[in-house]
Amino acid sequence: MHYNTEEKNKVEYKLVRAVTSCGIVDDRGVRGHVNFIAKGDQENSEEELFFAELCADGYMAYATNCVISLKGVESVGRLRGMRYDYFDFSVKGLRIDAKHCYACSPRVKHPKNGLLYESGHVACSDYYFG
């Protein structure tokens, strides 16, 4: 698990179960937002909800871009299906809102800090789903 390879993380986690996911195709390529439950290796550890963003390479293998525990964190984002043309962010002619994910359904939980993941930030109503 990607999280376990970072030396700063003192607790190692084991996957308990996958919860939900969303595939995204945007100007950065193919990404996936995933929620899963994992449990730490310490005594009395509880199961925790995690968010991960995966990036597909040309061979459909996935590299991990972000893995973060959502334990005790208010999750935001997941605004697919809403009309949101009123945002006034502009990068390369696209409206961008780095705090929210517009590609995922309400079932996918995201970290409050949207800068931790790269995809899903284009705030144009028909960008992901035409």
Image (cartoon, helix red, strand yellow):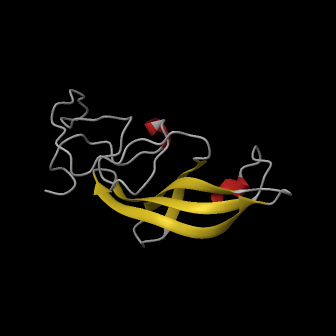
The reply, left or right, for residue 8 in relation to residue 65 is right
- Count of marks, rendered view: 0
Q: Is 27 in front, or is 89?
A: 89
Q: Is 99 in front, or is 109?
A: 109
Residue 125 x/y as whole percent = 16, 45
Q: Where 123 falls versus 1 (above or below)?
A: above
Q: Name the quadrant containing residue 46.
A: bottom right
Tell me what residue is drawn at x 52 percent, y 55 percent. 52
Residue 13 x/y as whole percent = 72, 60
- From the image, which quarter does the N terminus lie in? bottom right
Tell me what residue is drawn at x 50 percent, y 59 percent. 35
Tell me what residue is drawn at x 23 percent, y 30 percent. 90
Q: Where 67 falls versus 60 (above or below)?
A: above
Residue 22 x/y as whole percent = 37, 62
Tell me what residue is drawn at x 65 percent, y 62 percent. 38
Q: Can you name the residue that lies furthest to the top here?
A: 88
Q: Where 96 falls versus 54 (above or below)?
A: above
Residue 112 x/y as whole percent = 48, 37
Q: Name the quadrant containing residue 98.
A: top left
Q: Can you name the residue that lies furthest to the right here?
A: 43
Q: Is 130 in front, or is 50?
A: 50
- From the image, which quarter does the C terminus lie in? bottom left
